[in-house]
């Protein structure tokens, strides 16, 4: 099982909905949670792999946030840049 993302920085446009293709390539459970400090802006469903899902994320404000796997938050995390 692998407890790391293949990307440590993601980007999306500000103020418009967008989709994230989430590919859990192993048999463990993972998800993607976009965080602003300790508050979740979007939390995707937990995915038991191997499986690919599309997370539909509502419009987010411009800013620099973090993302993490709620199952493995200290091992799987990164920066999420939302731009204008």
Image: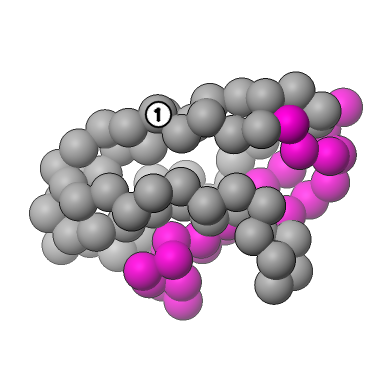
Does the image show residue 12? Answer: no
* The C terminus lies in quadrant: top right
Tell me the residue at 78%/50% (across/down).
64
Tell me residue 2's x, y (percent): 22, 60
Tell me the residue at 60%/49% (across/down).
42
**Crowd rating for badge 1 (residues with CA inside 10 Å; few <14, some 14–19, many 20+):** few
Relative to residue 81, is residue 69 drawn left or right? left
Image quadrant in which you'd find residue 3: bottom left
Query: Vertically, is 67 above or below 53?
Result: below
Asked if the stretch drawn in magenta spans residue 58, the answer is: no
Tell me residue 28's x, y (percent): 18, 60
Tell me the residue at 85%/39% (across/down).
62
Query: Vertically, is 77 above or below 10?
Result: below
Which type of secondary structure does the marked residue at label 1 adopt?
strand
Observer-nearest of 47 and 64:
47
Tell me the residue at 46%/47% (across/down).
44
Observer-nearest of 68 and 5:
68
Query: Vertically, is 14 above or below 68?
Result: above
The residues colored magenta run 59-84
**Residue under circle 1?**
54
């Amino acid at each position: 099982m692998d407890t790391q993302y293949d990307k440590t920085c993601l980007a999306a446009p500000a103020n418009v909905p967008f989709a994230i293709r989430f590919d859990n390539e192993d048999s463990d459970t993972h998800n993607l949670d976009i965080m602003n400090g300790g508050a979740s802006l979007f939390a995707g469903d937990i995915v038991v792999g191997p499986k690919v899902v599309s997370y539909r994320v509502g419009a987010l404000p411009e800013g620099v946030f973090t993302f993490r796997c709620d199952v493995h938050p200290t091992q799987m995390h990164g920066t999420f840049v939302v731009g204008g």
